[in-house]
Image (cartoon, helix red, strand yellow):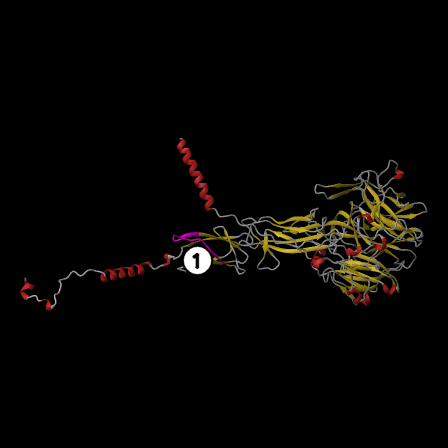
Amino acid sequence: MRARRQLAARALLFAVLVSLLLAPAPAAAVDPIPGMPLPAEPEAIGLPFVADALPFDLDGDGTRELVVVTGSEADPGLAALQAWYVDDVALGASAATPGNAVPLRRSASGDELLTGVGRARIDDEGMIAVELDDPARLVPAHRDGREILLVATLGTEATFSGPCCLTIWEVVDRDRTLELRLVAATQRNADKLIAADMDGDGTDELLVSEGPQNFDARLDVGLLRWNGARYERTGFTIPGISGCCARFMDTGETDGAPGAEVLLAGPLVGPSGDAPTGLHRVSLRDGAPFVERAAIGEVLAARALFLDEGPAVVTSTAFTTLTLWSWPRDAEAAERRAARTSGGFPAAVFGTGSETRILVRTGDPPLSVNVLPGDLGGGAGPSVVFGRDTRPGAFAATVQITGASTLTPFFGVIPGGLPGEPDVYVFGGRVVRPVSDPDALAEAASVALLPGLTLIGTVGPGGAWIALEFEISEATALDFPPSAGVLLTARSPVGIRLVATASLMEPEANGAHLTPSFFGVAPDPDHPGGLIVGNEAASAEITGPPGTYVSWVSRGDSGQTTIGADGVAQIRLLESAEPTAPDGSGAIARIWVVTPAGHGYHGTWRIRVFRQPPSLAFTGDDVLVDFSPTVSGQTVPGATVTIDGRPVQLAPNGSFEASVDAGILPTQLRVVAVDLVGNRTERVVTVIWPVDYRRLPFVPMAVLLTVGAAAVLFLRRPDTGPSRRTPDDGATFEEIGG
């Protein structure tokens, strides 16, 4: 029995050794494709998470501070109000110092009601998630001709936990110590708030949307007027607009009477509320709110402007037509002129009179902005077209409706403007000035692409610093209203940064191209700029300033990460392809990054599965005599060739030749070619030195050798016949017969 076990163990060991010897060697790992690191940037100061932020000159010294709603110092989970004071133009963490944090909480006394509780928490990945029960909003307003700052609670019945309601506090700076003074407390929830001087006395009134937020309810509105000590509320209803999705569009002087009006629109009440209808205007008459409606069809955007002919309103309808209206008090809105655009709507209005300019976002060419005169140029259409930035990084300006979190750029006016340019509009990575002079417009300054960043505004001496809110947004297409193509955007604020304005205004290096290092892939020989992948997973490594945000989309999957303290971020673009994956399948991979200083870089690559084994052919097989035995052949360029495990140098065209060890007996050599992504081809070649006798013609050689041997034998055979005697040997006949 013991002998049998030993015999079985030896047989098993022999089988394992044979399988190891016969099994093909594993494919060589794919060589990485080296990339280029993102350029170093000046330091950016990171602030904690903020629910809202606003540049505001709290102390009246002409320099704006950054006021934020953030976490309380005593309880990071409790919302608080704080100001950051920026005193230094030089970049550095010491340039910005935080003031005291005033908690925004509910007190025991209802009369001392502050804003609702806001919760901020850190998730498992170190990202800051926000759960605000009662969102707090910062609202700039005017009182007696001077600018003041208010902080207000805005909430709905669905979001409030605990007693309601709307509260408004005035922010007071006393030698860099913030205080809050209660100026309004109502028993109503609020959804939106807008400030406007509706009676022209230098003090703003506040208009808030109230009541149930559903399609079947009419829009309830609260008007808050200053009585010298606090705001008093007057409630009223707008019958034609649903309480859901009402929009405050703009404020301005539109009816020719003293004071500003508020323009708003929204869907109809009830089941028929499938589209915005008309434009509503709220004004003050004898101290009471007054509502008018202009039946001018769908209104998707409206702006007030003041021309030489008087006040006017410009509207966009279904994103295809801009229309200029006159709307005097107690009169119907009358069309002055119209200008057709391709997917345009008024994004901003600058100036007055003949200097009025309308900035219109359009879709033809994609993501462009038109600068129109305020009177629409007599209906002649756009006077200047400012196309989008064509740098590769500008692709990040395209909203990806994929259901995944993506980065979207900032479009809009920079609050406070830029140094020397108070009225500027950022669009597609460019600063657009509100002028219709083509030469001046062509010289528009570049600015960082700002994907995923919102410009809060400039702060510090001379606007030397700029505050950026860092956010991720998830956009989803809605069917309501059908003609509007409305996008529901869920914003996920991540943090806020203070960046040197001069640094932000510098365009991205290398044309905003992102050049990461790739692993598991190789350059696609058939599609320049593309990549091929074999059996390995495809991944990328991005090197850059710590804190850089990285987002990617590949084959419908998406992800986000940040570059860590080691300056490196690694992402997986494609898992190992299944053995059954068809050749040529793959994915389009897109990567965006945003640096701490606000610059955006982007790249797009096509990755396709490549499973074709590399070709492998040999040359010189008919050599008969070779005193220096070699193996030579041809394979695909860039492949790796080994002969019995020894690497062979490959020429750029894929040819190779290598000396080998051989003897008089046949020697078998295993030649393996592995392409750039691990596909392999294996062949066995036999070498004999110095003469490959296997190639000799054996039958003719045998005949030839036989004939040659016979000739030699014949020539060398002995003489066995009778000897002859010469006649003079003296012998007689008788002797011969003898």
Q: Is residue 412 magenta?
A: no
Whole-percent x, y for residue 737 in the image: 6, 63
**Relative horizontal placement of residue 451, taking residue 672 as reference (left or right):** right
- Which one is in front, 198 or 293? 198
Q: Is residue 733 left or right of residue 668?
A: left
Residue 105 placed where, x, y %? 84, 39
Segment tinted magenta in the rendering? 656-668
| Residue farthest left in this picture | 734
State yes or no: residue 667 in magenta. yes
Q: Residue furthest right?
A: 228
SS at mark 1?
loop
**Point 72% across, 56% down: residue:** 397
Looking at this view, name the residue that lies furthest to the top. 1
Q: Residue at x 87, y 56 (%)?
A: 252
Looking at the picture, how far across and down is residue 243, in whole percent? 81, 48
Q: Looking at the image, which residue sits at the far bottom? A: 727
Q: Along the line of sight, which residue is nearer the eye, 568 or 532?
A: 568
**Mark 1 is on which residue type?**
Ser
Q: Residues within 10 Å of mark 1 (few under 14, many from 20)?
A: few
Residue 584 appears in the figure: yes
Picture coordinates of residue 289, whole percent (x, y): 90, 51
Locate the N terminus and report the quarter of the image it occupies. Answer: top left
Count of number-bearing discs: 1
The residue carrying mark 1 is 628
Task: Locate residue 617 relative to residue 373 in the image: left or right.
Answer: left
Q: Nearer the viewer, residue 149 or 447?
A: 447
